[in-house]
Image: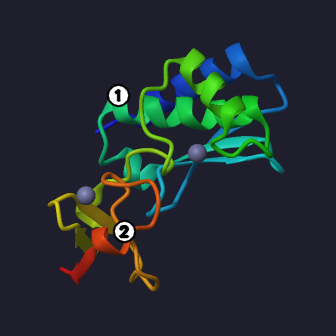
Amino acid sequence: MADPARVRTWAEALIRLHLDESWSFAFDNAKTRAGLCNFTAKRISVSRYISARSDDDDIHQVLLHEVAHAIAGPTSGHGAAWRTAAAELGYVGGRTHDGPVPNELAPWVGTCPNGHTSYRYRRPTRPTSCGVCSRRFDPALRIHWVRR
Ligand SMILES: [Zn+2]
Ligand SMILES: [Zn+2]
């Protein structure tokens, strides 16, 4: 588990190095995402709940992911500006979700025809196809969801 004091120290160091004094860090109570970059409040936050279940490297990556959002600005999403900032910070994780949310907490487990596993916190309402097999929706790669 990541020590909250250490997470805060890293976050404040990253903010000092890459952002400015108008930005701050806080823990939040989210359960379905690890980190958040709030542009209105100018605050980077990390879930204390997920932090407690993740190791140091994972939470460090979450911080880099969110700081990259702060550098890239609110309109970038996970676009080119965000990817450049994230790469420069040393972020090596994915861009499809904000940080490594622990999958053991997700009630919905999906499997594609090729055996890739996906997780969801909410019941999938629309047909989904496997993002590992194809970046576009493909009915042949439809994920079969089961609630555990
Ligand atoms: Zn993101
Ligand atoms: Zn697949």
At 49% from the left edge and 18% from the top edge, which residue is drawn? Answer: 90
**Image quadrant assignment for residue 24:** top right
Instruction: Provide the residue designation for mark 2.
Output: 129
Q: Amino acid at mark 2?
A: Ser
Q: Secondary structure under badge 1?
A: helix
Quadrant assignment, res 135: bottom left
**136 vs 15: above or below:** below
Above or below 101: residue 9: above
Query: Residue drawn at (79%, 37%), measured in percent from left and top?
Result: 73
* Position of residue 95 measured from the top left corner of the image (x, y, whole percent): 50, 42
Residue that mark 1 sits on: 57
Q: Amino acid at mark 1?
A: Asp
Residue 145 is left or right of residue 74, and the answer is left
Badge 1: how crowded within 10 Å, few (<14), some, or many (20+)? Answer: few
The residue depicted at 32 percent of the width and 51 percent of the height is 132
Q: Residue at x 58, y 26 (%)?
A: 86
User: Quick one: 48 or 58, which is closer to the camera?
Assistant: 58
Depth check: give the residue in front, 110 or 105.
110
- Residue 38 appears left or right of 65: right
Q: Position of residue 64 (x, y in %)?
A: 54, 29
Marks 1 and 2, the one that precedes in the sequence: 1
Mark 1 vs mark 2, foreground winner is 2
**Viewport quadrant of the C terminus:** bottom left
Whole-percent x, y for residue 51 in the image? 39, 45
Q: CA distance from mark 1 to mark 2?
A: 30 Å
Instruction: Evaluate if marks 1 and 2 touch, with contact meaning CB atoms under 8 Å apart.
Output: no
Total marks shown come to 2
